[in-house]
Image (spheres, rainbow, N blue to C red):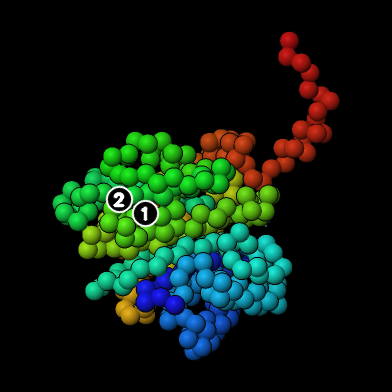
Amino acid sequence: MSDKITLSVIKADVGGYVGHSSIHQNLLEVAKERLSKAKDRGELIDFHVTRVGDDLELIMTHRRGVDNEEIHQLAWDTFVAATEEAKRLKLYGAGQDLLSDAFSGNIKGMGPGVAEMEFTERRSEPVIIFMADKTSPGAWNFPLYRMFADPFNTAGLVIDPTMHEGFRFEVVDVYGHKTITLSCPEEMYDLLMFIGAMRRFMIRRVFRKDGEICASASTQKLSLIAGKYVGKDDPVLIVRCQSGMPAVGEALEPFAFPHIVEGWMRGSHHGPLMPVPFYEANPSRFDGPPRVIAAGFQITNGHFVGPRDLFDDPSFDRARQISNEISDYLRAHGPFEPHRLGLDDLEYTTMPKLMEKLQERFKPEE
Ligand code: F6R
Ligand code: MG
Ligand code: MG
């Protein structure tokens, strides 16, 4: 056991209400009951259960470090219990993200998304947990770059002597199963070359140059785990703020621009990432558009003080309005690219069967 605090955010879609648009209150209750018992047993210091769209989010603090078997088991058992309730209510896609019948040591690779970090709690420890639905982990590349490397977003990079040195970005090649760490501002152009291709290269963690961890994202891709379409990955991201890290407002600022991400209907379309308050996190139009919530906490001796609903602010109204305009524009393309993902990226596709059926009718080009 460590003196450090571990913050673990583990999420899964274990059943939607109605369809894939939201979650039933009972699932949140089941999760709260489970985690509350774990807190009583001393396994957890504290927890907060929430949701975005159809995703159940377990936010936990403990002293067992990242990738801890007991904590992952606890999350797994909680999702299994919530699945039972989802099945009882015949909710949609009950147990959707639980890709295995039994837990085997680490929840990563079994369906749920995981973002964790271990750190020594500072004199005051403000953190933001971003949670998105109807998109995939590559969605964090753009905002993370802006928070930690772009002086036009983050004034602290220029003004605050403790941020002026810059940050290091750990990038995962999810197809090559490799990671590389690039340092900014020195290697900014190299970094952008990779992370602009957000289906393949994803920022997993960000560190200050003195080694302090600042951000951690889930980078699980369900389709790569399961080898077929099994739902989108609906990622989570933890960002520590203030005192040598981005201010809360600098961490939120990138979301004032609703950048285009992949996901939305059938995980097969491009759409804007709309920042919304908790109560608006129910993607319904064309199963979207993709959306993100921001839960702000002060972590105090490992306990959660919060959350504050950080996108519940009229200064994000315009981002929501622009998202709706972009949605109208993209939706008008119907089944045409670039609204629909490129063929290689389509996860839900009738193409192989169609090709087979029409094979005979293809003639050599004259
Ligand atoms: C996207 C998503 C939904 C479903 C769509 C079809 O991440 O979850 O858009 O893909 O509602 O769902 P099924 O195939 O379950 O009928
Ligand atoms: Mg779902
Ligand atoms: Mg979802």
The mark nearer the N terminus, 2 or 1, is: 2
Residue 105 vs 163, above or below: the answer is: below
Residue 332 vs 7, above or below: the answer is: above
Q: Quadrant of the C terminus?
A: top right
Q: Quadrant of the N terminus?
A: bottom left
Q: Amino acid at mark 2?
A: Phe
The reply to whether the C-beta atoms of the residues labelled 2 and 1 are less than 8 Å apart is yes
Towards the viewer: 293 or 60? 60
Towards the viewer: 289 or 109? 109
Residue 289 vs 31, above or below: the answer is: above
The residue singled out by tag 1 in the image is: 206
Image quadrant assignment for residue 341? top right
Q: Is mark 1 within 8 Å of ligand 3?
A: no
Q: Is residue 26 left or right of residue 308?
A: right
Res 202 visible = yes
In the orientation shown, which residue stands out farthest toward the front? 1
Spatial CA distance of label 2 from label 1 is: 7 Å
Q: Amino acid at mark 1?
A: Val
- Residue pictured at 80% horizontal, 34% vertical: 356
Towards the viewer: 320 or 49? 49
The location of residue 234, given as percent across then percent down, is 53, 57
The residue singled out by tag 2 in the image is: 167
